[in-house]
Amino acid sequence: MSKNKIEWEEVYELEIVKKARRWNRLRDVYTIEGINRRIEQGGYPEVVRDADRAYEATIWQTAGEVLKNRDRIRLVIVAGPSSSGKTTTTLKLCECLRTMGEKLKLLALDNYFWNLADQPRDRHGDYNFETPRALDIKSINRNITELLAGREAVIPVYDFKTGRRKEEGTKMKLEGGELLVVEGLHGLFADMTRGVSKEEKFRVYIEAVCQLKNRAGDYIPWTDIRLLRRMLRDSLHRNYPPLKTVGHWHYVRKSEKEYIVPFIKDADMVINGYLPYELPIHKKYLYPNLKEAVSHYQEESERADAFKRASRCLGWLEEILVWEDDSIIPATSLLREFIGGGIYH
């Protein structure tokens, strides 16, 4: 049995997975057919309400755990795989901590990407942003060390439109007693915070813990939920078509299996960012584009992985009923990170 398989079996036995399974069964959103029933019987708005409440409750619980150990904690890290909801979760957590009386500053690791011109490309012209080495780890460590020592740090500002860091960074300094919150894909990768002791860190991991079965009784992979989210965000907000997102996903999976997923077992708190009401919204925005992606990659024999992923995701959307009116999704919802219109972005 491979190392990765052992890790995944351990992940699936985590208490958060069992809790998600119970929650979904109680509300008849454990299967696609169940979600369709909730829509047909008028219960979809209730699912939206209850799912958001459950997610918010976990964030408040996380903030409470930080405060319990605040005498030793100086650094809170929020990490997780692509499109798991890190940005919304981090901002909500900061909001909760401030409500509880904490002062803090937020450091986003996305600002530490190397300039696009310095990133390697594959034979398809695609960049691999998913490895920790795509980030300036040396500068991350230097800035975190400066901040925790009470010194002023100059934080880079990355412009995703130009693919370059701006010439001038942003000055940051922690005032007495302030907490430093770090958010990023590879936040739990040891090299990112090698100068900070384990006792001083509180590590938060977020994942779309999707406990949902299709008509055949197969579980929908968590990664498929995140792929749908990323296709949605890329197409609506980054002028990056779903076709390219699917073709890039093999980089995402390779990197997260090695550098992200294994750290779920080391987290002090794991937050479930999956929303049982999101698939009907994904269908509204992505169904035609996914059909196009499947057709395209079917003709490219060397991109069999992309064809397989696109076909599988298309299958989930073909089974689920569509929900056209997304005004029902609150501006505070994590899903707004991907469809837009949220207050945290």
Image (cartoon, rainbow, N blue to C red):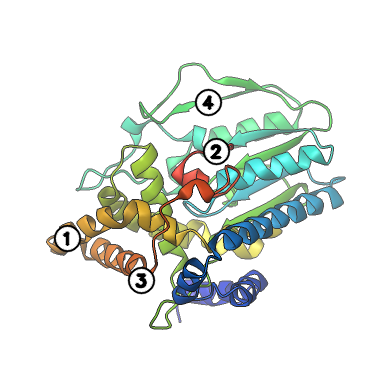
How crowded is the residue under tag 3: few (<14 C-alpha within 10 Å), some, or many (20+)?
Answer: some
Q: Do the residues labelled 2 and 4 touch (CB within 8 Å)?
A: no
Marks 2 and 1 sit apart, C-alpha to C-alpha, by 36 Å
Residue type (three-letter) at the residue carrying disc 3: Glu
Marks 1 and 4 sit apart, C-alpha to C-alpha, by 41 Å
- Secondary structure type for disc 1: helix
Q: Mark 4 points at which residue?
A: 156
Give the mark nearer the N terminus: 3 vs 2.
2
How crowded is the residue under tag 2: few (<14 C-alpha within 10 Å), some, or many (20+)?
Answer: many
The residue mark sitting in front, 1 or 3, is: 3
Residue 86 appears left or right of 176:
left
Percent position of residue 304, x then y: 21, 65
Residue 182 appears left or right of 302:
right
User: Quadrant where the N terminus lies?
Assistant: bottom left
Task: Give above or below for 280 relative to 148.
Answer: below
- Secondary structure type for disc 4: loop
Give the mark nearer the N terminus: 3 vs 4.
4
- Residue displayed at 83% across by 28% down: 176
Give the mark nearer the N terminus: 1 vs 4.
4
Give the mark nearer the N terminus: 2 vs 4.
2
Residue 102 appears left or right of 324:
right
Percent position of residue 145, x then y: 68, 34
How crowded is the residue under tag 1: few (<14 C-alpha within 10 Å), some, or many (20+)?
Answer: some
Q: Mark 2 points at which residue?
A: 109
Give the mark nearer the N terminus: 1 vs 3.
1
